[in-house]
Amino acid sequence: MNRREWIRSGSGALAGLLSFSGLSAAVQNSVSPYRRPRLKITDVQTAMIRGLHVRIHTDQGIFGHGEGVDAVSGGTGIVAGFRAALVGQDPLHVEALFERLRTSGIFAGAQAGQYVAALTAVEIALWDLAGKAVGLPIYQLLGGRMRDRIRIYCDSGTDNRNDPRAREFIAQIIQLGFTAAKIDIDNGSDPARFDRVNWTANNAEIEHMIDKVAFMRESLPKEIDLAVDMHGRYDAGTGKRMARELEPFKLLWLEEPVPPENVDAMRDVRQSTHTPICCGENLFLRHGFRELLEKRAVDIIMPDIQKCGGLAEAKKIADMAHTYYVPMAPHCQASPVGTMASCHVLASIPNCLVLEWHWGHPAERMAEWKQYVKEGDILQKGYIAVSDAPGIGVEMNDEYVRKLLRPGAAWFGEK
Ligand code: MG
């Protein structure tokens, strides 16, 4: 085909379009490439259930839903304070809105705690909204998917041989198909304690803690990993002793053998043992994890994605950790909405280890898990398949969840 023939053909017509003015017109008028929707935030609403749930509405009728947990008892008021900065804005500039709210709160506690947890719920609602607006699952907006299902571990519900329901709970872990479980061994009401305030464990307490781990390890098949939590209560000597005593059990991790505030103390424990040390459920933003990583104080980090700053922040924390070859195993107390939001982050990072799940007991809580979202039970044989639907990809079952509203709390903007 010579040049004249080519111009006469369809390709020639396309070439005409691709003059500068033609290209500009094509971009304006074409439905492909994709034209981003123009949206304005019209309302920001909250409902306090177990966690803080935020809905961000727009002038196009679509809304985003986010969840914050744990540090959210004052979250409704904090989100109300964000409202003026959000209404009228384009919600697709997620990171700009996040950064504006974060930096405008530097005298209001925006470094950690309640402020960041409330901001987290807003950030997740913005990502859900962005995904719905462009018709893509959030993992796609975070760079795409490295895995299509996320490994989940079960909070065990039992931890000792004297528990009459121990066998029942252990059977449940196996029957639900989990490949990992976790127990809590710290015990503030151990009768062997000499002092209600001091957290130096005596020999009897140490023996009791070891026996819990021994019981679980002999009860679970060896294919099921076991993690152990001490909840950051004990002093440095106890933390080091426990980490050494538990070495024969080849734990998945030992969590917060000492409180997380003193990173040097955490590093001392880590250097004293080959039990992997995990920490981070009460740390916030990248800044909360920087020193922990720089000082090589942990083997595994566990930010709470519904509390630490949100989905993009969690991905950045994971990326920081990855430069130290440290995997991430997030803390998770969230509903299926927040849990699925976490799965989008975990799908998009290389260093995903496992995600927490806390809904196996009591029976009412398990029933709640199964009815919380319209998609039903998203847990399948110890894994959660990452949703391919736009946004987070699960929708709260309002009719059911409304009954779980905290006494006195408003339901998403209703008076
Ligand atoms: Mg914990």
Image: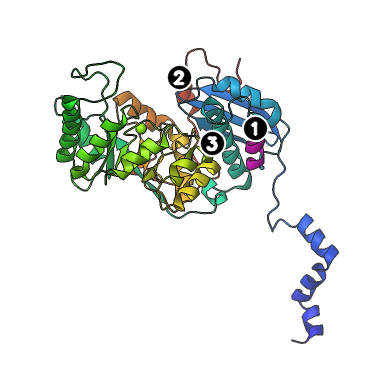
In the image, which is nearer the foreground, mark 1 or mark 2? Answer: 1
**Distance CA(mark 2)–CA(mark 3):** 28 Å
Location of residue 357 in the rendering, given as x and y in whole percent from the top left corner: 35, 36
For the point 19% across and 29% down, the residue is 206
Q: Is residue 24 left or right of residue 244?
A: right
Q: Is residue 378 left or right of residue 194?
A: right
For disc 3, does the CB lie below 8 Å from ligand 1? no
The residue under label 1 is 101
Q: Magenta segment, which residues?
A: 94-100
The answer to the question of whether label 1 and label 2 lie on touching residues, with beta carbons closer than 8 A, is no
The residue under label 2 is 403
Q: Quadrant of ligand 1?
A: top left
For the point 43% across and 30% down, the residue is 372
Q: Nearer the viewer, residue 184 or 210?
A: 210
Mark number, residue 309: 3
For the point 27% across and 27% down, the residue is 186
Disc 3 packing (10 Å; few <14; some 14–19; many ≥20): many
Give the amino acid type for the residue marked by disc 3 in the picture. Gly
Give the amino acid type for the residue marked by disc 1 in the picture. Leu
Determine the image quadrant of residue 211: top left
